[in-house]
Amino acid sequence: MSQHFDALETRDPGQREAALLAALALQVANAQANAPAGAERFAGVTAAKVDSRAALAALPVLRKHELHERQRAALANDPFGGFAAIGWGAARPASRRAARVFVSPGPIHEPDSARPDYWRMGRALFAAGFRGGDLVHNSFSYHFTPAGAMMESGAAALGCTVFPAGTGQTEQQLQAMVELRPDAYVGTPSFLRILLEKADESGVALPSLKKASLGGEAFPAALRDWLAARGIHGYQSYGTADLGLVAYETEAREGLVLDEGVIVEIVRPGTGDPVAEGEIGEVVVTTLNPDYPLIRFGTGDLSAVLPGRCPTGRSNQRIRGWLGRADQSAKVRGMFVHPPQVAEIARRHPEVKKARLVVSGERADDSMALECEVEGAAPEGLAERIAETIREVTKLRGTVAIRAPGSLPNDGKVIEDSRRYD
């Protein structure tokens, strides 16, 4: 437990805070100078004076829905909505050109730079036991969304070899694992469970697989213990396509240690006001990434600061981990589902008068059911057609339940997350 990714992880907390706040002032100046939306949001702000937590808390919080709306409004000229300092086009200097662009559900556009370990995932993989020479089975998506690239760049920073498995094709992925004998897995915990259960059904063993870095969804203790009983030690990483790594689990299994490249606040949901230490609130993150200077980005995730230091010697602040959502958006099998998507599904089927998406499951076995109020007898095949639309809009499978008018709760909820996380 004495090994660390670099010296930043064990530096004096006061030294870290001073370095972060100095970098914060420079990041505000960078956003003002190189990201049009940053110049607009921070008009009149003296960047050099944003050098304290209090000054940071006085800046507005950027919500994901606002990012989405601004990207939609500026789509013809800038798919990033003016928030990125990089882009593409012959007129743009080579130093300001993105290497790739991704489109996550929403849709939200995210830039990628050619800089090594752009999303800083190497730190989380190292804490999960990954080392140079390991073969990593990467089952995160390699198309549209950046998760696969995020993990691959982190593995490359450690000197690992990566098998780009991507999502789906369970039988083929299992065959590749049997033949290639990977040391480690990255992906969602639910898909790892599916792979291992398929291995049991097929009567094959995966003795080489000993470690896993898991993200994209909740990783309950029951599933962690289930994996450990099989000799696989799984650790959580918490990040987003917008921000990169935010926090990561260590051998201590005591919360998640914050990444060194972000400033994290816990605020009262619906506001930008920091809460007292230990109180549950929304995770708001300022990234120090110069290419995508998101300042006070509201993740919509709930967590709380965990007092004290990590027993591994890492001195950065810790959070308790993912404790739910501050808004009605939900992450299902590694993909976000938003209320506007539920509205779009209902819009495509005029028979549906009201819809409510219920997300349920435990031990990372997520399922979605769209409950639809329909007047009179539902037309034949309506449920099947709605299910097809669910997959088209959310890229996820879901069942459909037809309800009588007035049967859904009158509480304003569009998405109900009833999953168990104990």
Image (cartoon, rainbow, N blue to C red):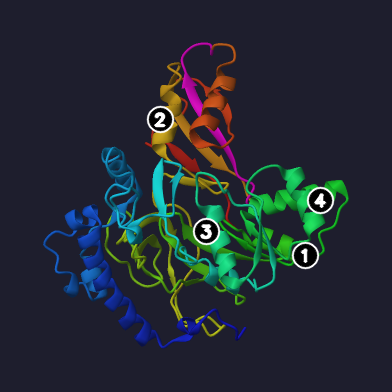
> Which residue is the site of mark 4?
199
Residue at figure coordinates x 56%, y 37% from the top left: 396
Rendered location of residue 287, percent (x, y): 36, 65
Q: Does residue 296 appear left or right of residue 196 in this picture? A: left
Within 10 Å of disc 1 (Cα), the crowding (few <14, some 14-19, many 20+) is few
The three-letter amino acid code for the residue at tag 4 is Ala
Does residue 61 sit above or below 347 in this rendering? Answer: below
Confirm whether residue 402 shows in the render.
yes
Query: Where is the C terminus found, in terms of image quarters?
Result: bottom right
Task: Report the mark closest to the observer, 4 or 1.
Answer: 4
> Which residue is the site of mark 3?
150
**Residue most extreme to the left:** 44
Magenta region includes residue 331: no
Kindly identify which numbered label has been placed on residue 229: 1
> Along the polypeptide, which appears first: circle 4 or circle 1?
4
Task: Report the mark closest to the observer, 2 or 4.
Answer: 4
For the residues labelled 3 and 1, say whether their Cβ atoms are less than 8 Å apart.
Answer: no
Task: Report the mark closest to the observer, 3 or 4.
Answer: 3
Q: Give the range drawn in magenta.
A: 364-378
